[in-house]
Amino acid sequence: MNSIVKKAAIAIGLAPALAALFLVGVVAAFAVPNDAVIKNLNDRPEVLYARRADNGRVIDADTECIGMSIGLELSAPAADLLHRAVKAQSLYGCAALPPYFSGSKTQKVLDYFRYWHGYLLISRPVLSVMPYNDLRGYLFTLSLGLFGWLLWRIGEDFGAKTALALAAPFVVLNAMGLMVVATKATSWFLAIGAGLYLSRRKSAEAPLLFFFILGALTAYFDFFTAPAFIFCFAAMVSALYEIRAGRKPSWATFILSGVFWGAGWAGLILVKIAIADALLDAPVWGNFVEAALFRVRGETADVDSFIPGAALYENIAAMKTFWGPVAVIAFLILPVATKARRARWAGLVRSRSVCLGIAATPLLWMEVFTNHTQIHAAFTQINYAPAFMLAALVLAGSRALPPTA
């Protein structure tokens, strides 16, 4: 208990330093000159505002366009750099970009101060020297390289079947969007980077401070794409290495890790809102609360139902026509199709395996934020990954899972 209290105190002490560092980073991203960024965004505009964003969902394409317009000088007259960075104005959707690139200043401008927009630390410097289409290639190469590195490590430690089982969900899920779309790729980097760190961590002590920092970085970089995925992907890798070390992953450690991660994530979001409220003459807290409530059960024409399971269904339905049935067969049917596989599930239940909780947490997240996860189904379906990973491990009979006996 003393160790937990000490780590909580350290986390509280870290928070102001992280907030200051985050703010400096965002201001630096906004300081990147606009002319080169605009030129490179407009190099092949059809790539930026194509109505697909690699998933067929218009709203997710619009989210990328919104994110790429943040940091541009949209205010007239332009505010000082600090206020611009905190206010984080954006154009709304892809339709506003072509007129803006043509010199029009009549488009609707929104204040998007709810997020830190840490992804700009990657996108704006890169866009100052290369076109947006090349940025996507750069993100894909880096994403695939990091994921390949993690799979190689897991294959070395657990065998090829385990590595393939952990990779399999990303064949059918919309991982490509997270690998190439600038506002989403940083979520992928955080999850895979966390896995790489945890795969070589030697201490048997719970990595609570690591999860606090991971939560803070999630608040900084993630565009509310898949926060639960980032946490649970790291928790799954951590649990597998606990099993490899001969220790049973505990529910207490998983819950405490979630508390520390949640404190980092929610705490740094609230710090951002507090900074915005202090600097801006706007109803910042009211806007934040309204947006948060909307993402839970906000009424909109884009959401057909709020019955339990609606968000889970929409994320399956948003998969490509071919990959939806493949996902159902590979991760829902085949893992329970034989007596041996059902025995593995029974063993997980009997042993009260924490892996079951890790797999279920992002599914619960999707149901809580049901409005958001139905509207953005093509990106939020990544929350299926931990559950699909566990199903694939059962299907493969991986030695990363505890014995069924």
Image (cartoon, grey):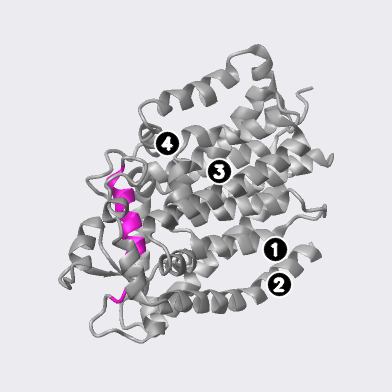
Give, as a single range, the part of the protein colored magenta: 57-73
| Quadrant into which the C terminus falls | top right
* Within-10-Å neighbours for mark 4: few <14, some 14–19, many 20+: many
Say if 6 sits above or below 183 in the image. Answer: below
Relative horizontal placement of residue 73, taking residue 207 as reference (left or right): left
Residues under numbered marks 4 and 3 in contact, where contact means CB atoms less than 8 Å apart: no
List x then y, in percent, for residue 361. Answer: 55, 43
Q: Position of residue 277 (x, y in %)?
A: 39, 79
In the image, 393 versus 402, the foreground residue is: 393
- CB atoms at circles 2 and 4 under 8 Å apart? no
Residue under pointer 4: 312
Distance between mark 4 and mark 1 Cα atoms: 31 Å
Read off the residue under disc 1.
209
* 77 drawn magenta: no
Task: Determine the residue positioned at 56% across, 18% down.
Answer: 334
Q: Are marks 4 and 1 in contact (CB under 8 Å)?
A: no
Q: Are marks 3 and 1 in contact (CB under 8 Å)?
A: no
Instruction: Write down the residue under mark 2.
Output: 10
What amino acid type should be assigned to the residue bearing mark 2? Ile
Q: Earlier in the sequence, mark 4 or mark 3?
A: 4
Q: Which residue is mark 3?
A: 361
Can see residue 112?
Answer: no
At numbered mark 1, what does the secondary structure look like: helix, strand or loop?
helix
- Whole-angstrom CA distance, mark 2 to mark 3, is 27 Å
